[in-house]
Image: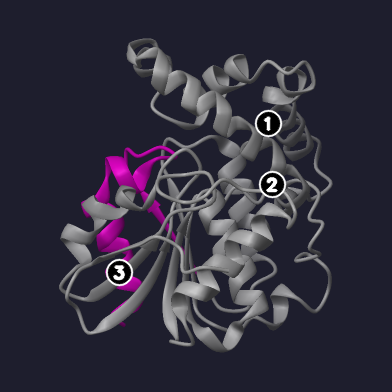
Amino acid sequence: MDMPFTRDMGQGGQHALMIHCMLAHSRAWAGLSQHLGDYYQMHAFDLPGHGRAAPWDGRVELQLYAAQMAHRVMDGRPMDVIGHSFGATVALRLAVLFPQLVQRLVLVEPVFFASARDGSARVDALLQAEHDRCAAQFAAGDYMGAAQRFFAFWGDGPAVWAKLPQAKRDMIAGQMRLIEATGISVYDDAPGLLRPGVLDRLDIPVLLVEGEQSPPIIAAINNGLQNRLPNVQRAQIAGAGHMAPLTHPADCAQVIRRFVEK
């Protein structure tokens, strides 16, 4: 694997690997870097099919491939790892695969839906609703419709989608095939992260972050992770939704500082 395209931000004495969400790129961390750059040197890379990264070729499961990219960027250097949304699930997988390299883990709005399953009718209904949100459109090959629905729910809302130029909409619709490919890891837990003896042995400090206005499934996911990880703290970003690192970078930086500067 070639070295992924990476942006280095900040001049601090500590190193952090940054893993962005789907439909974004490494520059998504620029706002956060303005508030953490005195503490961290932040190494942000582009996920497959995003930014300047090459397209995903489908030969290696997407979450695993992204974790391998992250490992390549770390180049043997222990770091804190900060991930957002799908990037947070990649960060968790990275920590399981290479625990000796991950000093602390910050998972912002992790979309690891499988961890929310607790047998309750409410959570099962939330999971089913989330799974069904785009599933029918994926099955029909309607990636543009899936993109609009996904963007409205997890992104900046329907009003912003309506203002996007057609070329941008076409690009996002193409990236929805990557969203579809994440299901095996985030819904089905094909990697087996939730099996006994996996997460409960990950004894590094972990911070779980969620937005106050985020979809309820995120709190259920974080509850499930908190019940499995032995060294966990929780934080909520007031007034924020799923895109908190972009919309509320100062507040995100504040909760991360409280976590890492103890």
Q: Earlier in the sequence, mark 2 or mark 1?
A: 2
Taking the spot 42% from the left edge, 81% from the top edge, the residue there is 79
Q: Is residue 196 left or right of residue 10?
A: right
Which residue carries the number 1 mark?
130
Q: Is residue 146 left or right of residue 240?
A: right
Q: Earlier in the sequence, mark 2 or mark 3?
A: 3
3 shown above or below 166 = below
Helix, strand or loop under label 1: helix
Q: Earlier in the sequence, mark 3 or mark 1?
A: 3
Pick out the residue farthest to the front.
2
Taking the spot 75% from the left edge, 54% from the top edge, the residue there is 59
- Residue 247 at what x, y percent from top left? 28, 40
Observer-nearest of 101 and 58: 58
Q: Is residue 123 left or right of residue 82?
A: right
Quadrant where the N terminus sits is bottom right
Helix, strand or loop under label 3: strand
Identity, as a three-letter code, of the amino acid under mark 2 = Phe
